[in-house]
Image: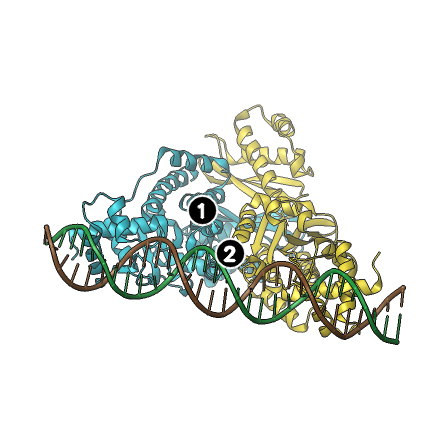
Chain colours: A yellow, B cyan, C brown, D green
Amino acid sequence: MLTERQKQILQIIIEDYIATAEPVGSRTIARKHGLGLSPATIRNEMSDLELLGYLEQPHTSAGRVPSAQAYRFYVDSLVEPGTLTDKDRALIDGWYQERKRDIDDIFRSTAKILSRMTKNVSMVLANKHSAANFKYLKFLPLDTGHAILCIVTDDGEMDNCVVNIPLGMRAEELDYLAGRISRMLAGRSMLAISEEDLDRAYLNVTKDKVLLSPLNSAIKKMAAESAEQKVFLGGAKQLLSQPEFRDVERVKDLLGILEEERVVKDLLAAGTDSGMCITIGSENKFSGIKDCSMVQATYRLNGEIVGTMAVLGPTRMEYGKVMAVMNYLHKYLEVILKNQD
Amino acid sequence: MLTERQKQILQIIIEDYIATAEPVGSRTIARKHGLGLSPATIRNEMSDLELLGYLEQPHTSAGRVPSAQAYRFYVDSLVEPGTLTDKDRALIDGWYQERKRDIDDIFRSTAKILSRMTKNVSMVLANKHSAANFKYLKFLPLDTGHAILCIVTDDGEMDNCVVNIPLGMRAEELDYLAGRISRMLAGRSMLAISEEDLDRAYLNVTKDKVLLSPLNSAIKKMAAESAEQKVFLGGAKQLLSQPEFRDVERVKDLLGILEEERVVKDLLAAGTDSGMCITIGSENKFSGIKDCSMVQATYRLNGEIVGTMAVLGPTRMEYGKVMAVMNYLHKYLEVILKNQD
DNA sequence: TGTTAGCACTCAAGATAAAAGAGTGCTAAT
DNA sequence: ATTAGCACTCTTTTATCTTGAGTGCTAACA
């Protein structure tokens, strides 16, 4: 267990290092912060803290650097979320207004804001209406031989695709077919409509199998699409200003991860429990970001998870600031999403 | 005018520099390529070429490096498009198969392939069905107070959005309204439907203005969406392997451009004339890429431009290879897009 | 017993100098 | 016109020295 003074010193070291990216020496601590202790005393404490695993020395004659363990302790016990200045808020509000046409724009803006405010990479994952239920389907005639199949879900979303219509089938027949099938599938979760269900519903209405297969694949495609997640990224550029990414090799590792959408989804899927979730250094899943930290928050609408946002950067991250920004965006998103609906 | 031998030497220098990224010396040329000339002779020629503006010397005792002018000459007169190996083709085919669900996936794949094959940044711009004509609109009932407005265009695409329905309006009325308006607007280009057109069509049917405004904004939104261009990027990672991007500052400039979708669109919009278009160094529009080259090709469907693909990298680019890859992808895309339709 | 001053020690980073290496330009010979 | 030879230039590399920040330890002090 750390003494109060050790905690104080540890906090000073961490925050100084976060601010400067330079190893922190006993002198600096004594000078900058009015602890009323001499460098020698502080040195002793630092020595203890190193023994306890909270500090590391790049080499004998350098100051100390916080270990992953230190950051973990910091985010768990030391850091307070911080609060945004009015200027920051105004900035965020402005960016959100800038371009706001549809829901995608909002996520895009969120990613952009997140990266700009935190000077790190941001990732925003949007779950597309995952729990939608089938409401009805309808055919919109296009020309002889083609129609647009529309499937409407009870949350007011819809998907569509073009299907081939057997020659000679009339609009009324299609309407009849659509109506009957709709009634049989109504209320079912899109994800839960199996091939057999559809077969049964279809064959119940007509013995003519000709439309069954395209209908089936259309529903499958739509179900898949509705389960689809979209990823928005931002701020790879900001990252390059961070001293830890002066070395191109490290940037490469990171970009390698960010460019694989699959990997990003995987990364964000991990921490979808509630609240804010911080993973530090080797706690991370992928080796390319073993010396990075990630702060992640999920946002919900009516209790249901609609997405996740995260900031990824060096372990030397302004955790307080990041959390503050995320909190703010979080509230923002909830309001916007609620109104959108 | 350059002599045949000067051209030969210039070509050797350019291709050697493209391959090695090191200034090329007279020795190297004499040794590697059986020109039957001594280094001294080659030196004289190089001296002339420098005077003519084709070569540059980083410093007195270094070899020579091609100038922008040299690259220009190279792509205009010297380079032959090159041809892909069977292995490359197999690779490309494989990547295209990998994930091919909808048209977006195909563009995404194209960007990915382009960047992987050329080890440079790739950009793919997809114009969304720009010349679509209005076919009809239809309301799909949702619940009391809401319906989904569907607008179908004659190329079989459709868009939809939710609109508020005045309380008490019945489905039959909506159908009637939709039918009448549809007939009046049918065949019009989506982009050309002005507010007044809609007003006129609408007021012709009913004096009750209550649905006019949402209808209007819906059509506007859809028209805007259908004119929208999508950008797909790939391969920022590859770029970091290039020696010219060892320096993080240069990467920053480039990423700054790539992260602004607006800028990318602007960049790609410039060269939408036919065929392959190469811009070298300071020929480029934005200062962030003044020492980069861009190879760009537009692809068409039935004579109409559906998009553009481009490769962006250091001026020291494998132009021949890039052109070969693009040619291949170009053909690929045309076939796929034709079948998609 | 906790704190502090003093001092020797360590190690990275910066500065300076010398050596190596690659390539050129010029001249004179072929 | 071509080429061999050679002096010259300038970067790159290597080695050596110096500087400075910071530690760890010991002994004195409250």
The residue at 55%/49% (across/down) is A253
Residue B201 shows in the view: no
Q: Amino acid at mark 2?
A: Ile
Front-most of residues A339 and B323: B323
User: In the current view of this chain or complex, which residue is farthest to the top?
Assistant: A207
The residue at 25%/53% (across/down) is B26
Front-most of residues B106 and A145: B106
The disc numbered 2 marks a residue on which chain? B
The residue at 61%/27% (across/down) is A199
Q: Looking at the rendering, which quadrant does residue A103 occupy? A: bottom right
Residue B111, numbered circle: 1
Whether A255 is drawn above or below A224: the answer is below
The quadrant of the rendering that contains the N terminus of chain B is bottom left
The disc numbered 1 marks a residue on which chain? B
Q: Considering the numbered disc 1 on the image, is that residue within a helix, a strand or a loop?
A: helix
* Coordinates of residue A294 in the picture (x, y in percent): 66, 53
Q: Amino acid at mark 1?
A: Ala
Front-most of residues B239 and B101: B239
Q: What whole-number distance in Å separates the C-alpha atoms at marks 1 and 2?
A: 31 Å
Q: Considering the numbered disc 2 on the image, is that residue within a helix, a strand or a loop?
A: helix
Residue B59, numbered circle: none
Residue marked by disc 2: B219
Whether B98 is drawn above or below B264: the answer is above
